Amino acid sequence: MDGITEQQIADYKEAFGYYDRDHDGKIPTSDLGVVMRSLGKCVTERQLREVSKNFETGYVDFAEFVVLMQTIPNIVDTSEQIVECFQAFDRKKTGYITVEQLREVLTTLGEELSTGEVDNLIDRYCAVEEGRIEYESLAHKLVQSIQ
């Protein structure tokens, strides 16, 4: 397993073992996202659906898991990237987007969120002023919440 430290292997084994409930050396593909994210991987539901297709039994063994871990990027401080995305909707360069714009983007683009998930995100992370959200602050809060 080239390029993987002994500490990473130990961390992988610990997380994998937690979800290997019957101690048979396998975890269900339905748990992959939780395990991978707990180890700092940035994996989308779409990626998980695609990966899961490769495991007809619905289970992944540890060696397969380690290989998967090497194919998914780590979560990094991407607040600058998030800000750049929001700037595309801020034509006047005010530093704000409307709640409606945020709602539309999050429910229609990329990994689409439900209305309830968007409401939760707005309630939890957004300071709404006159129907607008200061997106740089939002980007930093979102990144901090996953680290």
Image (tube, grey):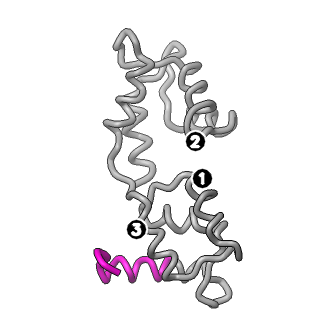
Which of the two labelled residues, at mark 3 and mark 2, occupies the earlier sequence position? Answer: 3
The answer to whether 118 appears left or right of 62 in the picture is right
* Vertical side of 141 occupied by 128: above or below: above
The residue singled out by tag 2 in the image is 111
Q: Which residues lie in the magenta part?
A: 1-15
Report x, y in % for residue 125. 50, 36
The residue singled out by tag 3 in the image is 70
Which of the two labelled residues, at mark 3 and mark 1, occupies the earlier sequence position? Answer: 1
Q: Secondary structure at mark 1?
A: helix
| Residue name at image x 46 percent, y 82 percent | 13
Rendering quarter of residue 99: top right
Is disc 3 surrounded by few (<14), some (14 to 19) or many (20+) residues within 10 Å? some
Q: Nearer the viewer, mark 3 or mark 1?
A: 3
Mark 3 to mark 2: distance in Å? 22 Å
Q: Secondary structure at mark 3?
A: helix
Number of the label disc, if any, that sits on residue 63: none
Is disc 1 surrounded by few (<14), some (14 to 19) or many (20+) residues within 10 Å? few
* Residue type marked 2: Glu
Q: Are marks 1 and 2 in contact (CB under 8 Å)?
A: yes
In this orientation, which residue lies closer to the viewer: 49 or 139? 49
Rendering quarter of residue 86: top left
Q: Nearer the viewer, mark 3 or mark 2?
A: 3
| Residue name at image x 39 percent, y 54 percent | 75
* Residue type marked 3: Gln
Report x, y in % for residue 127. 48, 27
- Magenta stretch: includes residue 75: no
Quarter containing the C terminus = bottom left
The residue singled out by tag 1 in the image is 45
- Magenta stretch: includes residue 8: yes
